[in-house]
Amino acid sequence: MATPRNIISASLLVLGVLVASASAWAFDGQPLAKEAKLSLEQARAAALKQVPGGTIADEELEREPGGSGLRYSFDIKAGKTVREVGVDAKTGAVLENSVESANAD
């Protein structure tokens, strides 16, 4: 027979698994994170310096030509404009800072 204590323990275990799963896939490209020398937080800070007052609308870690070949890519909204800022995941260098086109993927 299930006791209240066992039910609570099982519920907490399930909740912990769900939270761990959600945080493990917090952004596109998470499986590549082990190759990055820069954390997502460090890359966010570098990207936001490029667009003062902007807010991140999308972020991913991807293999992309240029730099080390591994970059964080951010879509940063500032007013009505969306800029794409790419930060090298191994060096921290800003590799791209351009206005996102209307047909962007």
Image (tube, helix red, strand yellow):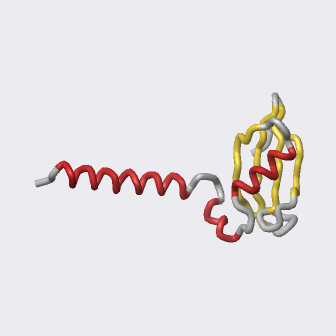
Looking at the image, which residue is at 83% across and 69% down?
A: 68
Residue at far left of view = 1
Is residue 100 among what the camera can see?
A: no
Q: Would residue 90 appear left or right of 13 to someone viewing this image?
A: right
On screen, 74 above or below 39?
above
Looking at the image, which residue is at 81% across and 33% down?
A: 78
- Residue 44 horizontal/vertical position (percent): 75, 51
- Residue 15 horizontal/vertical position (percent): 38, 51
Q: Would residue 13 appear left or right of 65 to someone viewing this image?
A: left
Residue at far front of view = 5
Looking at the image, which residue is at 76% across and 53% down?
A: 73
On screen, 27 above or below 53?
below
Q: Would residue 58 appear left or right of 31 to someone viewing this image?
A: right
- Residue 65 horizontal/vertical position (percent): 84, 64
Q: Would residue 62 appear left or right of 87 to someone viewing this image?
A: left
42 vs 29, nearest the viewer: 42
